[in-house]
Image (cartoon, rainbow, N blue to C red):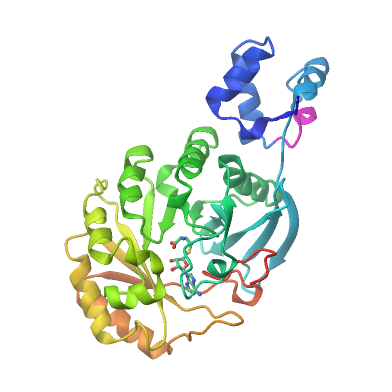
Amino acid sequence: MPKINLKALSKTEMKEFVKAQGLPDYRARQILHWIYGKRAESIEDITELSKSLRQKLSHAAYIGNLELMSRQTSKDGTEKFLFGLEDGESIESVLIPDEDRLTLCISSQVGCAMACGFCLTGTIGFKRNLQAHEIVDQIITVMRIRSQGITNIVLMGMGEPLLNFTGVVEAIHRITELMGFSKMRITLSTCGIAPKIIELYQKAPHINLAISLNAATDDVRNRIMPINKKYPIKVLIDACRKIPLSPRQKITFEYVMIDGINDMPEDARRLIGLLKGIPSKVNLIPFNPYEGSKFQRPSNDKVLAFQKILIDGNITSFIRKSKGQDILAACGQLKARYKT
Ligand code: SAH
């Protein structure tokens, strides 16, 4: 029988495993605490268990770990981690320090099927969904090698999280229940899989949602985000209106600004119209270039003018600082080891 990876087990599965080993229930809690709280890398590390028990468990199971294949640091302090998975695939995570925050941006899939025209990950194509433990292990591994605590988690790395719905919901469950992270410090970013947005709020209420809107008309959005043909802007915005937000919660709308494509003053005015009545804020992300990309970043003046129109229209709006560009760690620049 192949050995069981204890990190791959849900809470219920861990209880079953412990029972099958002829052990009492509390051992499940103990092992989970050592994996998620103490970040044990092997069964041998769980020193709370007797040596003989550790040996016994090691015959049936092991603790799998992501393989840290490289770690790069940007001149602005952003770090990019390349992780190898058990089947030889690879993913990236990005750690972003910003004043009193330390945000870890994690991946949900190997590659991505969405093929957004401005995103480097999209050019890899889709390889596979990450399993819940491969999503969570990005956090565990970075916490193990960095002493400073992570304050925020964003599901904004490689992949479309809502197309790996089961894996992502289970990962959120483990991050909150087993690692003790507040849901309010987790943000999931989606290209807009409308039906799944509503379902997410039933399965993982209170987490923050970011929607990659990136255009204010279907014409432009169809051109840069093929998913818009399936879930056009109206369908997407209607889904957002149905989300039962908590009193001070807002939906973030991300808007990648691409020179000459979606950065005109009338785009800003249309955006104000679209978001009317939704508790929201807009994150403007000036396009991050990469080798072979066909788009350009607009001038700072254009970005500021766009932001001013939004603010004058009573829409809270921020310009996202582009971090880690020199190591291809900024939004839309993750490609792991894949050739594009
Ligand atoms: N699939 C998810 C999460 C990954 S993309 C989503 O679509 O939201 C994370 C964010 O990076 C999205 O808002 C996306 O629009 C943005 N992005 C992608 N490529 C970019 C680029 N080249 N420059 C700036 N932002 C980009």
Q: Was residue 42 drawn as part of the magenta stretch in this picture?
A: yes
Above or below, comparing residue 156 to residue 86 in the picture: below
In front of the other: 324 or 267: 267
* Quarter assignment of residue 80: bottom right
Q: Is residue 78 left or right of residue 316?
A: right
The answer to whether residue 216 shows anywhere in this view is: no
Q: Position of residue 230 (x, y in %)?
A: 33, 61
Q: Position of residue 153 (x, y in %)?
A: 50, 52
Q: Was residue 232 drawn as part of the magenta stretch in this picture?
A: no
First to last magenta residue range: 40-45
In front of the other: 166 or 45: 166
Q: Position of residue 142 (x, y in %)?
A: 65, 51
Quadrant where the C terminus sits is bottom right
Above or below, comparing residue 297 to residue 158 in the picture: below
Residue that appears at 48% across and 48% down: 164
* Quarter assignment of residue 10: top right
